[in-house]
Image (cartoon, rainbow, N blue to C red):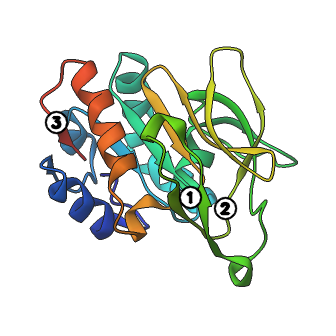
Amino acid sequence: MLALQGDVIEHLAALEHCGASAFAVKTPADLERVDALIVPGGESTAVMKLLERSGLGRAIVERTRAGMPLWGTCMGMIVAAHDVVGLDQPTLDLIDITVRRNAFGRQNDSAQVELAIPALGKAPFPAIFIRAPWIERQGRNVAVLAQREGRGVMAREGNVLATSFHPELGTDARVHQYFLQMVRQQGKASTAA
């Protein structure tokens, strides 16, 4: 669990509830100890600066391109994206999507939405959106797994998962379980961070 900013404690609790070993990643040495990484919500510009200063950004890119599963939630989706609409903002460029920041509105437009996510089963997922991005463009190898108002809000490309909502703030663990299944498919031992 990348622990520079955001919903670190909530993600750690959700992972542990699912039976995974999880801990906070703050340095490149911490990153070496994990089989997978979650980049939580927060403020993307600040996190990109912290990733660059710490050397973690380069290490995350190298590990992810070598096959380490990575999941970005909300700000994490922005950080993992190829680019951001209307902004010359650096990203890690790990999933071939173009995102729009704050696409569903500001803080007071936050909402919980019953979202159809067929990959998680028939029951809708209670997705919590807070100043959430949406996907404006996806590459041909990107699978959009869920949409809201006709816009992608959950996508996967190989070993990279991105959600514009916050599964860690609710009690439904299906997205965390989905990510842990991705980790198992990579042949890893479910030490997620």
Which of the labelled discs sits on residue 165, or is there none?
Answer: 1
Quadrant housing residue 80? top right
Mark 2 lies on a secondary structure that is loop
Q: Residue 33's quadrant in the figure?
A: top left
Q: Which x, y percent locates residue 184? A: 22, 26
Measure the C-alpha gap from mark 1 to mark 2. 6 Å
User: Is disc 3 surrounded by few (<14), some (14 to 19) or many (20+) residues within 10 Å?
Assistant: many
Task: Provide the residue designation for mark 2.
Answer: 132
Which residue occupies 55% across, 43% down? 117
- The kind of residue on which mark 1 rests is Phe
Q: What amino acid is found at the position of numbered circle 3 in the picture?
A: Ser
Q: Is residue 29 left or right of residue 57?
A: left
Q: Residue furthest front?
A: 122
Badge 1: residue crowd in 10 Å (few <14, some 14–19, many ≥20)? many
Give SS at disc 1: loop
Q: Position of residue 111 (x, y in %)?
A: 64, 74
Pointer 3 residue: 190
Image coordinates of residue 137 in percent, x first then y, are 79, 32
- Seen from the viewer's position, the closer of residues 114 and 191 is 114
Are discs 1 and 2 less than 8 Å apart at CB?
yes
